[in-house]
Every structure is written in C-alpha cells, then in structure tokens.
Image: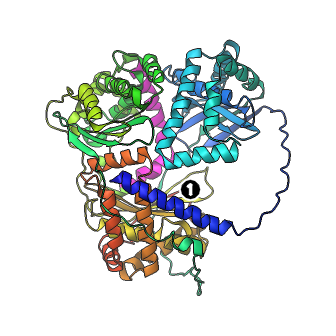
C-alpha cells in the first residue's frame, strides 16, 4: 500500500515540480557568467582558541586541512577520515580507557580543500588541554607508523555499501547526485565509489603524512561555565498593545505554484506490511522493498526508566546503554566491531537497536545484534569506567542551562512526586553496582515488549525465519513491567528564567498539559489548527504576526506532543529580551482567536495540504518508514494510520478546529521558561 502510494506521489511531485520549473526558468534568457575568481589558499597557520560553553560537558578539538573535491587525493582523504572515526581506531579508545566521555573524527569538503577535526568530550570541571595533547599524540602515531590495513579495507567497504543505502531515501539520492554533479563536478556518485575502490593503504598513509600536520593544526577547547541558578518569576504581565499593521497586502501565488499547492488524492490501497507475533510475544513487522540490495532492521524494547528503575538505582538505564558497545560474552568490543566491519554493517544497540546491511549479510548481521542484546558482556572494568564517566557527565548536566530549562519546565508541568520527575544524579550513579545493572537489564529486556521492523530486499518468509532462528527462544518470566505514566491534571501557570551567559537572545518555551491522548478524535483538528499557526514559515499565522508584521521573533514553532496517556501543547520562540512579553501577548491573542473564530478557508486548505504532504513525504525513506511503524506499534495504532490520517485531515472543518482549540488549549495556562538574559 505505502509503496504504491509513495511511487505515485513521488512521480507526481517530481513531474509536476520539474515541469513547472522548466516553464518558469525556461523563460529566463541565457547569459554568459563571469569567470570565477581564482582561489589561492595560503599555507595553514596554527591557532588555538579557548571558548566558554553552555554545554554540560567540555570539548577538545584538533582540526586539519584535508584534500578537496578537485584533488586526486580526495578519495584517499575520505578513507583516512573514516579510519580515524572508527570505533576500532585509537581516537575512540580514549573512551573505554576512561580518558574521554566520547571521541571521534569528522570531515567536510569543498572544491579546493576540506577540513577534518578530531574531537573528544571531557567532564565539566576538568581541563581540556591535556586531551588536545592526547589527540595530537594519537594522530602523530598514525602519521609516523601508518594506519592499520584492516581499517582501510573496512572503511572502503562501508563507503561502497553506503552508496547502495543511498537508494533507500529520495532525500539521500537527491543529496548524493546534487553533491556529485554540482559541487564535485563528477558525472555521477559512482565516480567517487570507483575512486575509493582504487585507494590503497599507501595512498592513505601518504595523505596522512601530507595533511595531518600537528604544527599547523587549529585547536580549540570549549569549557563549560556556570550561568547561575534558575529564577522563579512572580508572573507574566500581559500587554494589550497591537503590533499588527492596519493594512496587509494580499499576495497571489505565481502560476507555477498553484497546481503544486493542491493536495494529492489519497486512497487506502496496495500491499500492507506483514504484521505477526512470535510465540514469545515479540512483534515482527516486515515490508519488502526492491529499491536497493539492502535490508534494514529497526527494533525497540518498550521501556520507561522512570517507572522501571527501583528507588535509589536511578542511572542504571544510562550505564546499561553505554555498556552495550562493549560486545557480547563471545565477542569483546573490538571483536564485535571487527565482525560488523567484515560485512560492512552499521549497527546501534540498546533499547533502541538497528542494523543496516547488504542483503547477503542479513542473517550474519542479525546473529551479531542478537548475540549482543541477549548476551551482553557487561564487563566489570568497563562498568567502572562508564559509571565514573556517566556520573561526571550528569554532574555537568545539572549545571547546564539547557538541561535546567527542561528540568524547570517538567517540574512546573507535573505534580511534585510524579515519576516523570525522577532522574539520575551523580550520587545515585556512584552507588550503583554491576548487579544493579544486570537486574535492570532483566526487568526491561523482554520479547513481549519488543517490536522489530524489517524493511528491504527480502521476502517476509525469509525475514521471519531468520528472526525466529535467533530470537524465537528468547523468554522472559513474570508479568510485564508498567511502562505508561498515569494521566495528570492541568498544570498551573508559572514563569521561570534560566540564566545563560553565552546567549545574547532568549529562547522561550511555553508549554501546558493537555487532557487528550493520541487516540482521541480531536487530535486531528488540533493538528490542523497548529499548522494554521506554524509549520510553513512565513505562510502561517504565527510567523506572519510575530516576524513578518512585527519583527519580534527570529523563529517560532508550535507543537502537540501526544502520547497514550499524556500530552503537552507548546510554543517555542527566540527573540531579544525586550520582546519576550510582547511576543507572548500575540501568541495568547492568536490562540484565543483560534478558539472563538473560524479560520478562513485559505488558511484551512493550506494547513490540511501541508499536513497531507508531510505525512506522505515521511514515507520516502526506509528509516522514516521503519521508525514510523515502530512508533505506531507501540502506541497501539493501526499500521496504516498515516494514510487514514491524511484522509481525515482533508475532511476537517473550520468548526472542528475551533471546537478543539476551545476545549483543549488554555492560552493563559502556560508554563514559561526563558533561557538567556532576563526579559526586559
């Protein structure tokens, strides 16, 4: 069903857009462009920066110039960057050694040159400069001694496999082709892949010697700084001042946009994904696709640490998630990563897990993932390292303005002893034992709380057989743990300011609890109303009133976060301190109007059209489809809900939108949390 619908939509959008672009752009007369200015890069000079940060951790970075698109060494430079980023490489080894919270290597490229930077995170309160020295030492060792041949081969295999995975996403295909043609000057993305196939270890080592020069490297240390404690405000002073101009000129859409703006026809037809349960309660959803020679598996163990963690053991979930990277009882950390590299697989592990692999390696990939999930190594020495690192990270988190903003928002939204307010503290992490982590694992990881979605070039019967082979014997004794919060009453209004010395503008979050749940019929008219207010930049009401007409904000977004038992409605905006109150006054006014007046036909049609296109375009990649199915399954919604929703949205009336806003949205009931300078 989705495949047929997606194919039709993709063709319609592609043909319609390109046809109209041809008509529109084809009338522009041809003109000879001036010659591009020559780019002559000066030799790189070393620089060192020390910066304050509002992050909950520090960052140490060492940056190098790398070959650009035009260089014959570009492919070797890409392989070199991949080698340095590998979890089997020495940069990442800083993490299991307890010397860094995280570590890796990233690269970016332009025609004449590229850039690459090694980075490592350190706990708040520590000095990041020794970490810069450690990074430089690791890089110099690779320059002097060369990079491991096995990592070069693994990098090449991953790059070649990624070219196949690009076919699973319209966005990925568009990105790879546009980058290859417009930026790199290639004839197709295959040019890069063919060049990577030819890269040798000697090529990579030569590029490392030529470009990874510590004497000219750019270094930076970003150190977290405290900005002060949150301040409770006495209240919010509303303004009756109007910022709307008396006359607003109506603008007609250009001819080429009128047809594209019409909503596509949606029908519930086509092939449904296979949806079945194993005898142990595990839910398996399978959708075949021949877009590429790949298979992807996405899984989720439904869990809620705030409800499943015993009192005093907060943090067991965080430590457990980090320990999965240490392999299984049969394959340690390096052996597990090497096994994944052998089949050019990408994987993630934990309560959310995934596998992207070529079709011929699917069963081997599943065997590796299952071995890790069902028989995790959880080594004592790694536990001690992760315990210390997690406690250090949380100690910094409690001083981070971003975390404090979210914390203060939750405390104002929910009752004092609500389980949603539980969180891991450094002291609870420090008191954990490895047995506590084992106990939490046994509580959470159960087949009857697990859903797996498989999408790719594989027959449902084959996919089912592989999953049954490796997961059919998985059992969990006893009743399922509770994973859903209880409903809560409406929150009281509140205003909080969280200081952040690194900001010159304010980030403002307005939020309130909402009584409806995701399965309530009013979810649909509320979403339509929200898309009247926001979601399409200047074309929607909040952007028009708050930015276009009054110039009060630089960004604004409304959202409804609806779950099975609880929901919240909120508005985010960014502005100068003197505009916080003015902007909120307009937001309250617009929300009140949504509850008392009917939205006009043009606004209603635009919002419905936007929602329908967003739903359909969310089905244009393997990952988005899989994650969508996972979310629907764990919300107990039908798997074809997006198509039914698209049909429902097109039927929503202005009266239904007004009634939903009148019933559920409280314009004066917000909790307001401001992150940044004190509002004026």
Does the stretch in magenta take in 384? yes
Q: Position of residue 617 (x, y in %)?
A: 44, 56
Q: Is residue 34 magenta?
A: no
604 displayed left or right of 214: left
User: Foreground: 523 or 607?
Assistant: 607
Occupied quadrant, residue 553: bottom right
Q: Position of residue 361 (x, y in %)?
A: 40, 26
Compared to 226, does 655 lie above or below? below
In this view, 76 is above or below 246: above
Q: Which residue is mark 1?
A: 676
Any part of residue 600 in sight: no
- Majority secondary structure of the magenta segment? helix
Q: Nearer the viewer, residue 389 or 341?
A: 341
Report x, y in % for residue 452: 30, 38
Which quadrant of the view contains residue 61? top right
Q: Is residue 469 shown left or right of residue 530?
A: left
What residue is at 38 percent from the left and 16 percent from the top? 331
Residue stretch in magenta: 382-411
């Amino acid at each position: 069903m989705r495949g047929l619908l997606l194919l039709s939509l993709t063709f319609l959008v592609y043909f319609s857009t390109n046809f109209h672009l041809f008509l529109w752009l084809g009338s522009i007369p041809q003109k000879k462009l001036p010659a591009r200015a020559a780019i002559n890069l000066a030799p790189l000079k070393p620089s060192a920066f020390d910066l304050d940060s509002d992050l909950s951790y520090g960052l140490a970075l060492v940056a190098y110039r790398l070959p650009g698109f035009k260089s014959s060494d570009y492919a070797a430079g890409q392989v070199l960057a991949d080698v340095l980023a590998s979890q089997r490489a020495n940069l990442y080894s800083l993490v299991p050694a307890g010397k860094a919270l995280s570590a890796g290597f990233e690269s970016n490229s332009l025609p004449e040159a590229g850039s690459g930077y090694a980075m490592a995170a350190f706990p708040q309160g520590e000095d990041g400069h020794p970490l810069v020295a450690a990074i430089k030492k690791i890089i110099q060792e690779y320059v002097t001694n060369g990079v491991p041949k096995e990592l070069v081969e693994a990098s090449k295999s991953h790059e070649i496999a990624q070219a196949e995975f690009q076919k699973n996403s319209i966005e990925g295909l568009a990105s790879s082709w546009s980058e290859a043609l417009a930026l790199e000057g290639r004839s197709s993305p295959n040019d890069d892949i063919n060049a990577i196939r030819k890269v040798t270890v000697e090529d990579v080592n030569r590029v490392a010697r030529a470009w990874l020069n510590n004497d000219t490297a750019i270094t930076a240390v970003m150190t977290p700084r405290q900005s002060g404690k949150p301040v409770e405000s006495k209240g919010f002073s509303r303004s009756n001042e109007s910022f709307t101009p008396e006359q607003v000129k109506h603008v007609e859409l250009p001819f080429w946009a009128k047809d594209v703006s019409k909503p596509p026809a949606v029908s519930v037809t086509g092939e449904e994904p296979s949806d079945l349960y194993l005898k142990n309660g595990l839910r398996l959803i399978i959708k075949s696709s021949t877009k590429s020679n790949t298979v992807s598996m996405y899984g989720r163990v439904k869990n809620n640490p705030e409800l499943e963690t015993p009192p005093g053991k907060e943090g067991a979930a965080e430590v457990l998630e980090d320990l999965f990277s240490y392999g299984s009882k049969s394959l340690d950390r390096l052996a597990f990563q090497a096994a994944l590299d052998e089949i050019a697989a990408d994987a993630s592990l934990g309560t959310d897990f995934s596998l992207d692999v070529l079709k011929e390696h699917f069963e081997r990939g599943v065997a590796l993932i299952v071995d890790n999930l069902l028989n995790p190594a959880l080594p004592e020495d790694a536990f001690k390292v992760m315990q210390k690192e997690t406690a250090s990270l949380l100690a910094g988190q409690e001083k981070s303005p971003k975390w404090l903003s979210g914390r203060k928002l939750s405390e104002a939204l929910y009752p004092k002893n609500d389980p949603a307010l539980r969180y891991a503290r450094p002291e609870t992490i420090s008191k954990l034992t490895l047995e506590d982590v084992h106990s939490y694992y046994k509580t959470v990881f159960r087949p009857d709380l697990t859903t797996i979605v498989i999408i790719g070039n594989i027959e449902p019967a084959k996919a089912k057989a592989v999953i049954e082979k490796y997961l059919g014997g998985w059992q969990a004794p006893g009743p399922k743990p509770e994973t859903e919060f209880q409903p809560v009453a409406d929150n009281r209004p509140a205003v909080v300011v969280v200081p952040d010395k690194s900001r010159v503008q304010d980030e403002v979050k307005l939020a309130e609890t909402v009584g409806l749940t995701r399965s309530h019929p009013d979810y649909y008219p509320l979403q339509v109303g929200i898309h009247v207010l926001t979601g399409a930049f200047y074309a929607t009401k909040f952007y028009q009133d708050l930015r276009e007409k009054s110039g009060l904000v630089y960004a604004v977004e409304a959202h409804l976060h609806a779950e099975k038992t609880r929901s919240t409605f909120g508005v985010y905006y960014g502005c100068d301190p003197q505009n916080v109150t003015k902007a909120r006054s307009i937001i309250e006014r617009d929300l009140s109007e949504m509850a008392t007046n009917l939205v006009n036909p043009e606004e209603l049609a635009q919002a419905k059209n936007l929602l329908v296109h967003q739903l359909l375009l969310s089905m244009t990649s393997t990952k988005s489809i899989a994650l969508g199915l996972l979310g629907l399954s764990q919300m107990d919604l039908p798997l074809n809900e997006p198509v039914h929703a698209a049909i429902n949205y097109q039927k929503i009336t202005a009266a239904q939108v007004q009634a939903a806003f009148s019933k559920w949205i409280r314009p004066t009931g917000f909790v307001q949390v401001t992150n940044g300078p004190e509002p004026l």
